[in-house]
Amino acid sequence: MAKGKKRGADRRRDILAAVEGMVRDRRIHEITLDEVARLARVGKGTIYRHFRDKEDLFFQLTASGHEELCRLVQEMARAGAPLPFPERLRGMCARISDFFLGHRALFRLLGEHEGRLGACGRRFREAFRERRRRLGEAVACVLAEGVEAGFIRPDVPREVLAQFLLGLLRARNQAFGPDPAERPPLKLVADLFLRGAAGGPGNRKRST
């Protein structure tokens, strides 16, 4: 029984890995389940044993990315705060950014799904929003340390701040191309999040 379950889990991972490889340069509508089965070296019926349909397969792939990123951030939150908060924030930004870059195709697919939420079934919409909420909560746990240390204003909900930070990181990785030299440094992203574009009262142009 346990061995059979392990084989099933391995096949599921093989199917998801095959799809993630295919979406690196293709859109969802361009991929067929026959191609997925061939690349994963499974029968098409095996796909249907693990996923309801093509929509469910692609949703589960994006969900697995969310789950992995959530675990990464949650581990950081549980690890405590051995560094001053600005350094800890930059460390979290680096870990999240590295994850985004290592799974560029996955998060492009995630963006496609997000844009199609209205057309998805209720089950998909609710599950997608729940996973996005959990990721925001994981980031918010780390940001809470910044509130307590006086680096982050306490009057804005931490979950809202978390989504702003995640948005900055997504924009850095998606809007500036794959060349690292083209992307703004992570230190700038963290500083923009903490201090805004003005950089604090001392940097604002004085009125005359």
Image: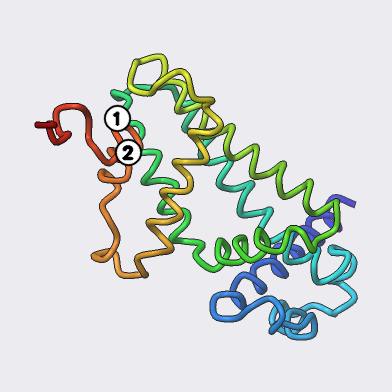
Label 1: how many Cα within 10 Å (few below 14, some 14–19, many 20+): some
Asked whether disc 1 touches disc 2, contact meaning CB atoms under 8 Å apart, the reply is: yes
In this picture, residue 56 sits left or right of residue 106: right
> Residue under circle 2?
90
- Where residue 23 sits in the image (x, y, percent)? 60, 75
| In the image, residue 137 above or below residue 110 | above
Residue occupying the point 66% across, 74% down: 18
Name which quarter of the figure residue 160 lies in. Answer: top right
Name which quarter of the figure residue 4 lies in. Answer: bottom right
Label 2: how many Cα within 10 Å (few below 14, some 14–19, many 20+): some
> Residue under circle 1?
86
Residue occupying the point 34% across, 16% down: 150
Q: Label 2: state its secondary structure.
A: helix
Residue in the foreground of this view, choosing between 108 and 168: 168
- Where residue 199 sits in the image (x, y, percent)? 22, 35
Residue occupying the point 69% across, 76% down: 28
Identity, as a three-letter code, of the amino acid under mark 2: Arg
In this picture, residue 148 sits left or right of residue 133: left
Residue in the foreground of this view, choosing between 133 and 180: 133
Identity, as a three-letter code, of the amino acid under mark 1: Pro
- Where residue 192 sits in the image (x, y, percent)? 30, 40
| In the image, residue 195 above or below residue 28 | above
| In the image, residue 203 above or below residue 126 | above
Residue occupying the point 23% across, 65% down: 181
